[in-house]
Image: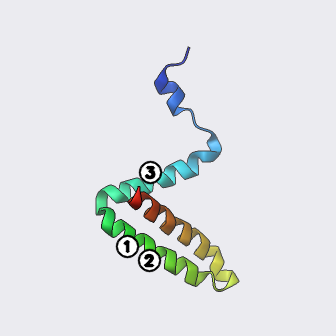
Amino acid sequence: MMSAVELRRRRPLLLWPLILLWRLVTALEKMIGIALLLLIGLVLMVAGLALCATFVGAILGIPLFLLGFLLVLRGLY
């Protein structure tokens, strides 16, 4: 029988990038604080939307927007 710790640590391999990104956002929150995290997240979201105006810019704009969204989400919750 598996212990609770072993069950909690089992994660699908495909979710690892999301888990690592969330841990990075959490570490940023602890280092810089919630207010600055929200501000940086909003700036990244606006920059991502501005880059999405062109097709070539969308390659960088979409991930930039998503990173900003994660920062704002982590700052609010």
Give SS at disc 2: helix
| Residue matched to label 3 | 23
Q: Quadrant of the N terminus?
A: top right
| Residue matched to label 1 | 39
**CA neighbours of label 2 inside 10 A, class few (<14), some (14 to 19), many (20+):** some
CB atoms at circles 1 and 2 under 8 Å apart? yes
Q: CA distance from mark 1 to mark 2?
A: 6 Å
First in sequence: mark 3 vs mark 2:
3
In this view, the residue in front, 65 or 21, is: 65
| Residue matched to label 2 | 43
**CA neighbours of label 1 inside 10 A, class few (<14), some (14 to 19), many (20+):** some
**Direction right: furthest residue:** 55
Which residue lies at the image location 30% right of the left edge and 63% below the top edge?
Answer: 32
Q: Quadrant of residue 13?
A: top right
Image side of residue 28 versus residue 55, left or right: left
First in sequence: mark 1 vs mark 3:
3
Q: Position of residue 68 (x, y in %)?
A: 48, 68
In this view, the residue in front, 18 or 77, is: 77
**CA neighbours of label 3 inside 10 A, class few (<14), some (14 to 19), many (20+):** few
**Direction top: furthest residue:** 1
Which residue lies at the image location 55% right of the left edge and 77% below the top edge?
Answer: 48
Give SS at disc 1: helix
Q: Quadrant of the C terminus?
A: bottom left
Q: Amino acid at mark 1?
A: Leu
Q: Position of residue 62 (x, y in %)?
A: 61, 72
Q: Position of residue 75 (x, y in %)?
A: 39, 61
